[in-house]
Image (cartoon, rainbow, N blue to C red):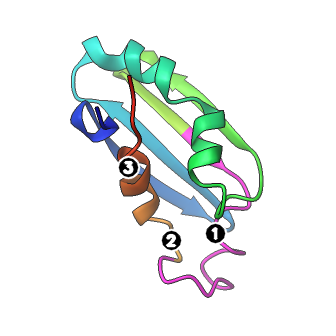
Amino acid sequence: MKLHEIAHSRTGDKGNISNISVIAYDMENYHQIKQSVTAERVKHCFSGIVEGDVVRYELPSIGALNFVMYQALGGGVTRSLALDIHGKSLSSALLDLDIE
């Protein structure tokens, strides 16, 4: 199944750092998301984009994970030549991730 079937996401950015929050639609799916969506998988998913570390923060009380991705926006909004300089489409790409 695809992650978007059991979760939604939000993105943010600051300079060359992007973050993606993955939020379970239903708290019953949080454990599955937590097991399947690791920092390593997120780093691999964005291997051509994220040049730095990916750090995962867990927010179990709201059924969410937050991924902070360093060196992820081609230098940041004012320096990048990327079409999506804010990284908003990264959340859509992550929600397309296959999970068990």
**Element assignment for label 3:** strand
Q: Which residue is mark 3?
A: 10
Answer above or below: position of 85 versus 24: below
Neighbours of disc 1 within 10 Å: few (<14), some (14-19), many (20+): many
Left/right of residue 40 with respect to residue 92 in the rendered view: right
Left/right of residue 92 with respect to residue 50 in the rendered view: left
At 43% across and 48% down in the image, what residue appears? 94
Three-letter residue code for mark 3: Arg
At 68% across and 74% down in the image, what residue appears? 74
Looking at the picture, how far across and down is residue 72, in whole percent?
66, 62
For the residues bearing labels 2 and 1, Cβ distance under 8 angstroms: yes
Q: Which mark is residue 73?
A: 1
Answer above or below: position of 48 versus 6: below
* Separation of marks 1 and 3 at Cα, in angstroms: 16 Å
- The part of the chain drawn in magenta is 67-84
Three-letter residue code for mark 2: His
Three-letter residue code for mark 1: Leu
82 in magenta? yes
Our reading of the magenta stretch's main secondary structure is: loop
The quarter of the displayed image where residue 75 is located: bottom right
Q: Quadrant location of the N terminus?
A: top left
**Element assignment for label 1:** loop
Q: Which mark is residue 86?
A: 2
Of callouts 1 and 3, the N-terminal one: 3
At 65% across and 63% down in the image, what residue appears? 48
Looking at the picture, how far across and down is residue 93, in whole percent?
41, 55
